[in-house]
Every structure is written in structure tokens, then in C-alpha cells.
Amino acid sequence: MIPSCRHDVLWMPVALIATLLCLAPTEGTAAEGTAAGGTAANPAGNDPSTGLAAVMSRLAQRRHGEADFTEEKYLAMLKAPVRSSGTLIYDAPDHLEERTLAPRAQSAVLDHGVLTMQSGKRSRSLAIADYPQFAPLIDSIRATLAGDRAALERAFELRFSGELEHWQLHLEPRDPQLRATLKQIELTGAQDAISEVQIEQRNGDHSLMHITPRE
Amino acid sequence: MNRAHRATLAVFLVAVGIAIFIVARAHYVADLSAFLPQSPSPSQQLLVQQLQDGPASRLILVGIDGADAERRAKASHELASILRRHPQFGLVSNGESGAGEADQRFVFDHRYALSDAVTPERFSVEGLESAIGDSLQTMTGTVGLSGADLFRVDPTGETLQVVDQISGGTQPTHASGVWSSKDGHRALLLLQTAASGADTDGQEQALRNVQSAWASLHPVGLSLLISSPGKFAVDARATIKREATRLSVLSAALIVLLLLWAYRSVPAVLLGLLPVASGALAGIASVQLGFGLVHGITLGFGVTLIGESVDYSVYLLVQGRSSDNRALWPTIVLGALTSICGFASLLPSTFPGLAQLGLFSIAGLVAAALVTRFVLPTLLPSRMRMADLTQLGLTIGRGLARATPRPLLARALAVGLGLICLSVLWGTRERLWNRDITALSPVPETARRLDAELRADLSAPDIGSLIVVTAADDQTVLRASETIGRQLDTLTADGALAGYDSPAHYLPSERTQQSRVRSLPDGPTLRERVGQVGSALGLKADALEPFLQQVTAAREAPLMTAATLQGTSFALGLSSLMWQNAGTWHAILPLRGDVDLARVRDALAAGPTGAAADVGAQWLVMNIKQETDSLYGSYLNAALRLSAYGFAAIVILLLVALRDPARVLRVLSALLLSVLCVVAALALAHVQLTILHLVGMLLIVAVGSNYALFFDRRAADEDGAALPLTLASLTLANLCTVMGFGVLAFSSVPVLQALGMTVAPGTLLALYFSALLAPRRLWSLCAH
């Protein structure tokens, strides 16, 4: 018999990748999205919850998205911040890809619940469902893709500010285990395009990611 | 009753007393071992041991079907928590996260002892720079931040290295937090019993506990599926016991009814059954004396003995009352000797079921014949009121006279029929024999399918190709497994196999653990090297402080033992791959993928595996299915060869006794023709022959020889006075045999069924063909 073997630590970045990817921007869907009733009724978006509903509804309508990213990490143990860059790809409903090109080529692909990480010659595949501690988080992300705000709120405390053309979404994890390491995530975007992601850890490490949709 | 009679009776009673004593104290086994070899080949011995007593034999695969994933997961959790409290289960796994956290902790805590990558080079300045640089790039290249914490304690990536080493094996998937089938419709559990697989009572108890734990959950809309080698054994035992009892009672009842109808005398029927009962008693006692144990299935064969031993008393009671019975005993003795020649050919078989059947039959027949010859006559009342069967005999004779054509035509018919049968057999020769051992297994097809399904769902190793390592102690076995593992790594890289599992993955040998720990530099040295590497990689001075502390701790840590693994799923991994039996340690390394066995064997033989032999370990590469099939094939070939010897012995016996080749030819043709017809009919019905059909053929010859010999004997008579009673007794005896075996043909145990459907029609044909080929003169005698 082969025992199961997991390592939570390995999974922390995965959960975050997925969070980011699901919120990654796309091109050319905003026009279709404006037809949604709630958005049309409150175009000003001054009411935060209405604005969030509008953003969620647009996010839900994306089928495909590709974007370039650059990220700077500020880690306490490093003398200087490190920078990485690459591409993010999303295909509805559950295909997410992170392709890092610098400092060296590596990738993480989440497809139908199986995550494959590749780095150099090494490749490992894992089924998300085998990691029950993260299953709720991943499920909430999938629900977010489907525009299910309630599911996102089960995993995070949300604070929305701004308006549809320029919004900020502040996320704080509810799960105590996750709270112990992750302090907050701050997303900045316009319509259904996210342009910036800031992540802050409890220990002070933080990162800043810039996202540019691909034409 | 005279003194000689009294002495005979006294001897008989003493013999019965001794036999009852032995039978009452006999050791009965009803598992599947009757179908396993007692073979001298070491790989086959290991195979049998593994099947009977190995860790795999202690696994119980459990599935929960129905309702939805949440409710299945809840049921799985509740069932597991009840069973974990039972001391009968060594391990209860259902994939719950509790166990997973223990595993993660274990891998993390023991990463330096477990990782293959830990060498002195890895901890040199160059090695550290490459390993730490690699981890740093992976971490910084991954979106997000959390990899940083792991990096600080394990910058050389040993945790991931160990995960990679172990997770080469596929694992069950999860749904709602517990193990689930790949399609997600079934929750899965894996239990390991404390009782050994050979302990059928212990297995039965364990299975009952699973059932009652399940019932206590009051599951609505959920169903429990169980499969295990133990369950196969328990079910097989119950089936064999039930069938043996049911069939013996049924055939005995039918035979008693038939004899009552024929004799119209209760004392005659009771006396007629005395040789049968004595024969059965003698048979069981001899098997116990000869083998030290009695297989349940042998008792099932007891029915076969009823079929033949009842014949003797029929001959005595029916024919013995006629005026001319001088020919009776020589003919019965010759018939019995013929049967014994046939059964003796089973004795040297290494197939325990067959050898026991041979001894059981010989002892039973001898006892039945002796009791009929010496005991029965002393017990017969001088004037027993019994139906006169002369009229019945005459009717049968006239019927036969009409049903058998003229001699020339009869012979032409026989030759023609024989040729047709032979051509059928030639046409089906490719598929005539079933060389798959599962053909003998009393495990029903549906149960085998469920087992295969659950096994696939659980990714439990289907017992396919594996390497077995044997040595005197656990450390030697582990060291040898490591040596072989290094060879297998190379072969895996070359594509000769997809991967393998090894007990050393879960518990490295002490020597390997020591050498890994010795690869770790002491505190000051490591601090100096890490400082040098760290500043080159842009790390702050104290960035890897946790790493330095952990390496120092790892250098001081005690070596891992099997006890260290307690509470993790690695304990199950280890105990299912390595175990102790009778002072010897065994390890199995299951090979995965499409394995090129020849290449693995060659590589191991050529490589430094010799080192494994140097330290006193032996290894064997084998494929279980191939091994069992070749084993069964060798049984079958041996049985065919032995049957041929038995047949030759019968020919010689008849030549010596009858002293006339023409008569011998006539007797043998009737028997051979019956066998050919039955086998051809089975082939046409797409029944593949097994070793038990062969035994059936032997029984046709054994029982049928009585008929042919009696016809032969009566044909030598000057008048037909004895003929009607001979015919009546032969018909009666034949009906008893057909009934006894006919009942077996409806058994759900394949071996009994095979025997029944061969012997019942075969003996009927033997009677007819004996009559067909008998001298025509016999029938004219009847006409008068």
C-alpha cells in the first residue's frame, strides 16, 4: 500500500496562485457585461456592495484571459527585492496557468483539479482534492469564477472601495490556519481587469504584482 | 454366528473405533490452500506464503456506495473511528486529514534520514550553492510569498525530494476529505487485520466486526462493499462446507430411496450402506494420517466414494443371492484393483487436493470392498426378505437386446463415434484445456470483479510483477532492498519499468541513515559554508539560521525504527512491504508499469546486486500471475502424465487378469469411448477442461471398468442363469453413481461441478457401451 503524502507548506503558494489567476484580467468582455441588470441600475457604483456585485458579475462572464505579469518580492531574508515575470492564462471553467519566464522558466498549471508544477526537469502532479485543507479555498475560487460572491466571502472578509472604473478589493482570510501566515491581499482594477495585486504576510514579507492584459 | 464371524466382527469394530478416534481429532482446513502447491521451488514457496500469510493477505478493501459524497464521507469517518478502537485491526486508513498531517510532520522531521539526495557532496560549498540557489529560484519564480518559510528551514529542498521519492506511487484521490474512487462515486477505506491471512477464523471475526460496525451506523441509502483475500477464504469455506453437506445428504437420500425401491427391505438398505460409511471413515482417517490435515474439499469428494462403494454391496446383495456367485468376487476384486490403479496415479501429485483425493478414494474403496467381502456376509440374516430382481434384470436384458445392434454394426458404430469424437477434440485442441488457475477457484466471478474494481480505486498494488528479498534480519533485507532499488532507479530511467515501491523508501536501513547523517557537516563547518553561499546568493546573514539549527538537531537525532513510523500511513506502507515469518524476513518491491521482466532479471544479475547476496540476502524477480499459471500448468501436465501411467497400469492389470488381448480390448474400448464422448461433448459445449475433469475421466474408467468386466465375465458363462441379476445389479449400481455425481453437477463449487458433469454422463455411457460391445450371445440368453 502506498501511503498518501502531502506537504502543506508546498501548498501555500498554490492557493495564492489560484486566487490571483481567477481574478486575472481579460480583454474585450466588458461590453457584454454591462448588460447585467444590477450594474445598469446603479451605474455610479458609489454603493460598495453594488460595485462589488458589478465586478463579480463581470468576472463571471469571462471565458478566456491572458496577461503578462511582473512581480517584486520584498523578503526579510533577502538583501534586495527579487523580481520575476511571466504570463498568466485562464480558460473557463477550471484551467489556470502561471508561466514564469524570469528569473528562470517554470510553470504551474491547474487543470480539472490537478495541479502540475514544472521546474527544470522536475515535474510533479497533485490532485487538489487530496488536500482537504485547501479544497474549501479552491472551491471558493471556482465559485468566484462563476460569480458566486457568497462563496468568496466564506473564505475572505471583503472590503470593496472605489467604483467600477477604478476599484480596490481588500481580502482578509477567515481560516485561522491561513490567517497565521497571510495578512491580506489587495486587488486594484478597472471593470473586470485587475491591474495590481499586493500580498502581505504576517511576518512583514510582501509582494507587488503588475498585470497587463495581452492584446 | 460362529467364532470366525465373531473374530471378524471384533476386528471390524476395533478398526471402526480407531478410525472414529482419528476422524474426530482430525485437523480440518477449509481455505484455498487445497489449490496451492506444496512445491519445492523457492519462488513458489514464497508465492504461496505471500498469498496465505503475507501482508497483502491481511488487507481488507472497503467501498461505500450510494447517496452523495458528503454522506459517504461521514459514513467513512464514522466507520473508521469505530474500527480504530478494535484491536483486531492493525491499521484503518480512509484518507482523513489527521493521518495526512502526521505524514507531513514525519516527512519534514526525518527529511535528512529519508532523502536520497543527502550526500557529503550535497553539503559541500558547491553542493549547497547549487541546491540552495535552485530552491531560491523556484521560490522567487512562484507567484506569492509563502514558500519563504519552508525555504528558511529547508533550503536544500529535502522535504520535496522525499515527497518525490515516495509519491512515485499513485494514491487514491479524495472527495469531501476522505479517499474516493476516481469517478468520485465511492468512498474507500483500507483495513489491515491483526489476524494473519491464513487464520480463516480470525478473518471471519474481523469481517463480522466490520459488518456490525457498519450496521450500528444505520446507514440509509448507502451500501457497503467488502473484498479481501480473507473474505474469499471465509466465503469459500462456507460454500464448500454448505455444498459438501448439502450434496452428500442429497445424493445419499436419493440413493437410499432408489435402493429402498429396488430391495423393498430396510435392513438390506442399511446393510448396503455399511461399506459406504466404513469407506468414508477409513478415507478420512487415512488422509489425516497421511497428510496431517484434511481439506474441506476432500470431504466434498466423499460423494464420489458413495458413488462407487455402494456398488459393491449392490453386487453382493443382488447377485450374491443367486445360485452361481463364484465369479462375483474375482470380478469385484479386479474392478476394485482397476479403480485403485487409477486413483494411485493421483497420489504423487504435488497438488494437495488431488493427492488427498487419491488416498481418500483408495483407502475408502479398499475398506468398502473388505467390509462387503468379510463383514457384510456375517451380518446378513440367513433368510432376509428382499425383492427378487430377476424379473427386472430380464426386462433390462430384453431392452438392451433391442437397443444394441448386430456385432458388426455395433463395432462400426463404436469406431465411427470414436472417430467423430477424436475429430472434435482435434478441432478444439487449442482451447481444450484451461491453463488459468482461476478456473479452479471457488471465488465467484462477481467477487473477483469487485475485488479488481476496489483495488484499482485504491491504487492498491495489483499483485503483478515484483521482487522478493529474503534474509535473516530486517536490516539485511532493507540494505538489499536499497541495493536493488539503485538498480531499479537506472532501469526506470531507461524505461524498463514505470517505477517501484520499496520498504526502504519508508524506513531506510540503519547503515543508510547513518551514512546520510554523517554527510551533514558539524555546526561550525555548516555555518561557515552557508554564510559563504548565502552572501553569494543575496541572502541576509541570519536568513538560514533555522536551517542550521535543524541540521544540528538532525545530527543528534536517534535513528528511525519501525516504531518511529507509528501513527503515519508509512507504517502501513512498511508493514505491507516487509514482514517476518518463521525467523526469516521478507521484503517485496512491487514493480509498476509494463515491466520488461527479462531485462530486470538480467540487469539485477549483472549489476552490483551481487552485494545483496554477499550480505546474506536472496532475491527473486517474479510475476505472480505467470508464476501461478505456470504452476497450475505444471500440475496439469504432471496429472496428465500420471494419468497416462495409471491407464497403462490398468491395461497391464487387465492383460494379466484376463489373459486375452481381445477381451481386454473390448473392455477398454467401452471405457475409452465413454471418456471420448464426454470430453467431446464438453468441448462442443465450450467447457474448458481443468484438472478436475481429468479426475472425472479417471473415475469413469474406475467405475465403468466394473460394468465392462461383469459383462465380460457373464459372456464366459455357459448358461444365462446369473445374467438377469447381474444386469439388475449393474443398472442399480450405475443409477446410484449417476445420482451421486449428477447432484455434484449442480454444485456452485467449480471443482465439484466439473467432476459431476464428467462422471454422471460418463458412467451411464460406460454401461451402455459395455453392453454395446459385449458379445451378442448375452442378449440371446435373456430372450429365453
Image: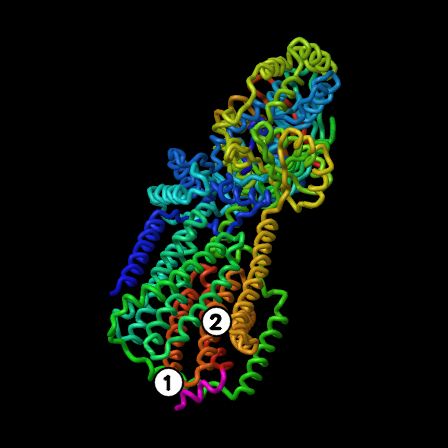
Q: Nearer the viewer, residue B464 or B41?
A: B41
| Marks 2 and 1 belong to one chain | yes
Residue at 59% over, 47% down: B624
Q: Nearer the viewer, residue B71 or B552?
A: B552
Magenta highlight on residue B779: yes
The correct choice, above or below, for B47 with respect to B781 in the image is: above
Magenta highlight on residue B484: no
Q: Label 1 lies in what chain?
A: B
Q: Can see residue B228?
A: yes
Q: Is residue B342 left or right of residue B466?
A: left
Residue furthest to the front in view is: B3
Instruction: State the image coordinates of residue A89 (x, y, percent, origin top left).
Output: 67, 38
Q: Quadrant of residue B426?
A: bottom right
Q: Label 2 lies in what chain?
A: B
Q: Is residue B755 left or right of residue B322?
A: right
The correct choice, above or below, for B613 with respect to B155 in the image is: below
At numbered mark 1, what does the secondary structure look like: helix, strand or loop? helix
Q: Which residue is mark 1?
A: B394
Q: Count neighbours of disc 2 (C-alpha within 10 A) and say few if under 14, some if 14 to 19, many if 20 or more.
A: many
Mark sitting on residue B493: none
Q: Is residue B387 left or right of residue B30?
A: left
Instruction: State the image coordinates of residue B395 (x, y, percent, origin top left).
Output: 37, 85
The correct choice, above or below, for A212 with respect to B23 in the image is: above
Q: Quadrant of residue A125?
A: top right
Q: What is the quadrant of the N terminus of chain B in the image?
A: bottom left
The boundaries of the magenta stretch are B775-784
Residue at 40% over, 87% down: B782
Amino acid at the residue labelled 2: Ser
Q: Which residue is mark 2?
A: B705
Cα distance in 3D space between marks 2 and 1: 22 Å
